[in-house]
Image (tube, grey):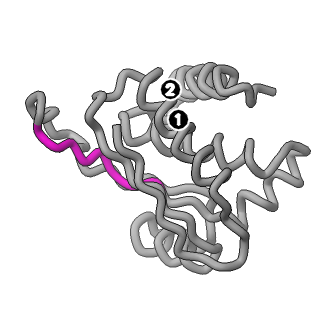
Amino acid sequence: MPVLVNNLQEKVPVDDQLVDLAKRAAGEALFLAGGHPDAEVSLVFVDDDYIHRLNREYRGVDRPTDVLSFALQEGEPMPAAGEEILLGDVVISLEMARRQSEEYGHSFEREVAFLIVHGVLHLLGYDHQTEEQRRAMRGKEETIMARMGLGR
């Protein structure tokens, strides 16, 4: 399951350890949530200005957010075995992740991993519009984070 990481911002340093953690978080989420083993996910690190523009354009929300998911397979049947499966993009504001990690009192790395897990689960069809959906998604997030050694 290929995980591509693209850093489009310069405000928060991105080193090899963060890239490795990002790939691991996406891989764990895909594996534990029943994603196709050949699925490809793209992770994009951006700043607040960039994600603000995306949030305004695609969701009609005029403010930055922490993570956005853009599913490419939404509502589509899964391709046959051996075919390329482009699951979608997870876009993360590293500026927002840094602020939230300080606000929540945990590491920046944990916050980035959580946002990636959250975004990948959205690509796989999880949502949090109802209380039941929110509980199911949160349970899956906590299981994945604990498996990575990043539980609460």
Image spot of residue 4 (x, y percent): 41, 54
Image spot of residue 109 (x, y percent): 74, 47
What secondary structure is the magenta-colored segment mainly? strand
| Quadrant where the image shows the C terminus | top right
Task: Tell me which corner region of the image, top left, top right, bottom left or bottom right, holds residue 9.
Answer: bottom right
Q: Nearer the viewer, residue 120 or 39?
A: 39
Q: Nearer the viewer, residue 66 or 34?
A: 34
| Quadrant where the image shows the N terminus | top left
What's the amino acid at mark 2?
A: Gln
Image spot of residue 24 (x, y percent): 55, 38
Image spot of residue 19 (x, y percent): 58, 53
Identify the residue at image location x=61%, y=80%: 49
Identify the residue at image location x=16%, y=33%: 78
- Residues at discs 1 and 2 in contact (Cβ within 8 Å): yes
As displayed, is residue 81 above or below residue 93? above
Identify the residue at image location x=64%, y=20%: 147
**Mark nearer the N terminus (1 vs 2):** 1
Q: Check disc 1: other Cα within 10 Å, few if <14, some if 14-19, many if 20+.
A: few
For the residues labelled 1 and 2, the Cα–Cα distance comes to 5 Å
Magenta span covers which residues? 83-90
Q: Secondary structure at mark 1?
A: loop
The residue under label 1 is 128
Q: Secondary structure at mark 2?
A: helix
Residue 133 has which mark? Answer: 2
Identify the residue at image location x=54%, y=27%: 137
Residue 113 is left or right of residue 120, and the answer is: right
As displayed, is residue 32 above or below residue 6? above
What's the amino acid at mark 1?
A: His
